[in-house]
Image (cartoon, coloured by chain):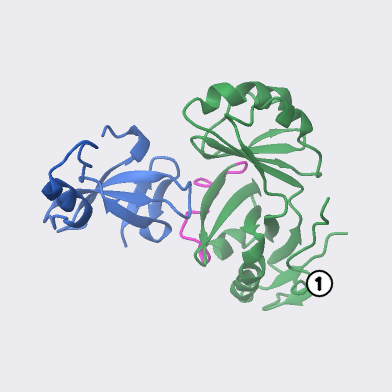
Chain colours: A green, B blue
Amino acid sequence: MIEIRSPLSSSVEPGEYGAQSAAKAALQLSERAPGSLIQIAGWQDFATVTAPALGALGFDGHGNFRTVQTAGPVSCYRIAPDKLLLRHSDGGSFKELLENLNPASSPTLDLSHARWLIEIEGSEVEALLARLASLDFSLQEFPEGTFAQTGIHHVGVLLHRVSADKFLIFVPVTWAESIWNLICETAAPFGFKVIVHP
Amino acid sequence: MLRIKCPICGLRDETEFTYGADAIVRRPDMDETNPQDWLNYVFYRDDPKGPHKEYWHHVQGCRQWLVLERNTLSHEIGACRLAREVPK
């Protein structure tokens, strides 16, 4: 298997940047590999033909276009009527899923090498994201466990709110550095800390 | 700023979308032999003033093709539906 390497390896330097309060940085930025990421697509009978495979993973149906379904380490994003994005956060295999899918009716695409995760956490996360994308990031309109696909700097991204003050951003690997730099620049007035995961 | 209510993603700024084509145009039957009908289909478009239907692509969202009702005079945005669900 091809080794997955961070597209941000030359950009991420741990430390504190921008405006700093006496207490602590208002934001924490970090990056990580998405784990295993697979996209399932289909046609009009998509729900029917993929239901057994999703059931085997522990999902009850396809969910809706806003809510992230989770079953253990696997998250399911319904990104279009006939398209799902599945993430195995610890990099586990989707072998069982693939065994339950007919590639002639439900083609899959491994995106593990094609996306990268940028994590933003902190008290000013809503204010920061509001400067990056034209969505309402208030907890009321964008609650925990929901996601949205939008554009940052004209690059298509997927935003997942995992808690009140933390978002995951799925970015295309080829644009990860540009998006990272833009986020850092935008976060500077708030003050931010870059963390490197072990 | 135009705001379009995508049936999948909800209300979004126009910058997430790309205009596709006139959604009123209908292709002639494949056995149509009148060249004028094909000429009209391939090259000629009306420039309507007022309510109109257009194809838009939600390129930075769900990537679905949509049929959007837009008033070309006032820019008022009307109904927006998945193109696959609009009868041809």
The residue positioned farthest toward the bottom in the image shown: A18
Label 1 residue SS: loop
Say whether residue B64 is left or right of residue B2.
right
- Give the residue type that dot 1 points to: Pro
Magenta-drawn stretch contains A2: no
Magenta-drawn stretch contains A132: yes
Name the residue at 51% across, 45% down.
A140
Measured as percent of width and height from the top left, residue B30 is found at 24, 37
* A77 versus A122 height, above or below: above
Q: Is residue A118 visible?
A: yes
Range shown magenta = A130-145
Residue A37: which quarter of the image? top right
Q: Which residue is under mark 1?
A: A14
Name the residue at 34% across, 33% down.
B85
Residue A36: which quarter of the image? top right
Name the residue at 16% across, 41% down.
B33
Say whether residue A20 is left or right of residue A66.
right
Q: Residues within 10 Å of mark 1 (few under 14, many from 20)?
A: few
The residue positioned farthest toward the front in the image shown: B33
